[in-house]
Image: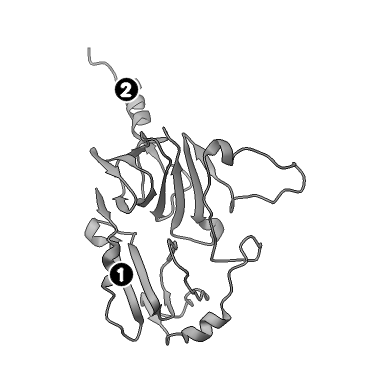
Amino acid sequence: MHAVTHIDWSLVDRPAPAGPTSSGLARQRLVGPEQGAVHTDLAAVALLPGGWLAPHVHALEEALYVLDGELLVDVAQRLAPDAGRKDTFYEPAHDLAAMDAAARRPPFGEPTLRWVGHYEGTGPQLETLRIRDAARGRASAGRDTALVVYSGISVKMLVDPVFGADHVTMFTVDYEVGGAAQAHDHPFEEAYVFLAGEVEGELDGQHYTFRPGDVAFAGVGSVHGFYNTGTERVRWLETQAPQPPARHSYRWVRDWERYEAAHTEDPT
């Protein structure tokens, strides 16, 4: 089970009517129950100049990736255990002028920073992975800055357990020319927002060409693979919900086919 769609940025011309909880807010749901999702609600959102969404708290996890513009964000604590079972709670709207006057850019790179991050993107793997500076004294690196690199693919985690999330992950994926993830499936849901380049995708046996602004969703057990057969690097934003289990989060179709062939008796 899968679904594909495209972000329609003309949504900025159709903001929702202003009300006590928002003003100048436009939203396009990309993945949700209508697409068969159980754990994923993915949306493209635009705030017009001066637009706002009132302070609120969810009984769920939410991750944001800012594509363009500058956004004022006020991040507070999690929902209290005795807050009840509602899904979302709103508080009175902010004084935007006062909020803007008090706002500062987050101190990215400081070890005390929580809940927010920044990613400049990476170049081709051969350049990104090259070691140029001295062994001693270079900037520290760890799970918060590391890339996962395999098969021409680079993954940079943005939201995960290290970041403080318990239920969702969000990360960027870069495919070098020739990079590929062979057909596989998962015991969780994945959603993809394509940002750059052109990539071939196969979902449940159907073939697609994805370009910037396209969106795809692969449900639990949906067999999918991606192949960069073009001439430029590919990038997309990806989410997983719930978080992958520690073991058996991938099932590679070819591996299981070979296993089955090796363990099936010849009836002759």
Residue 224 position within the rendered picture, expressed as x and y whole percent measured from the top left: 31, 41
Amino acid at circle 2: Ala
Which part of the image, by quadrant, shows the C terminus?
Answer: top left
Marks 2,1: beta carbons within 8 A: no
As drawn, the residue found furthest toward the top would be: 268
Residue in the picture at 22% in, 60% down: 34
Residue in the picture at 32% in, 28% down: 257
Image quadrant where residue 239 sits:
bottom left
Residue in the picture at 56% in, 56% down: 162
Residue in the picture at 38% in, 29% down: 255
Q: For numbered disc 1, what is the local secondary structure? A: helix
Q: 262 or 173, which lies in front?
A: 173
Q: Which residue is mark 1?
A: 12
Amino acid at circle 1: Val
Residue 107's disc is none
Residue 106 position within the rendered picture, expressed as x and y whole percent measured from the top left: 59, 68
Label 2 vs label 1, nearer the camera:
1
The answer to whether 151 is drawn above or below residue 78 in the figure is above
The span from disc 2 to disc 1 (Cα, nearest Å) is 53 Å
The colour scheme used to paint the residues is one colour
Q: For numbered disc 2, what is the local secondary structure? A: helix
Q: Is residue 126 visible?
A: yes
Q: Which residue is mark 2?
A: 261
Image quadrant where residue 170 sits:
bottom left
Is disc 2 surrounded by few (<14), some (14 to 19) or many (20+) residues within 10 Å?
Answer: few
Q: Is residue 76 left or right of residue 167?
A: right
Q: Disc 2 or 1, which lies upstream in sequence? A: 1
The answer to whether 236 is drawn above or below residue 132 in the figure is below
Residue 138 position within the rendered picture, expressed as x and y whole percent measured from the top left: 72, 48
Q: Is residue 224 visible?
A: no
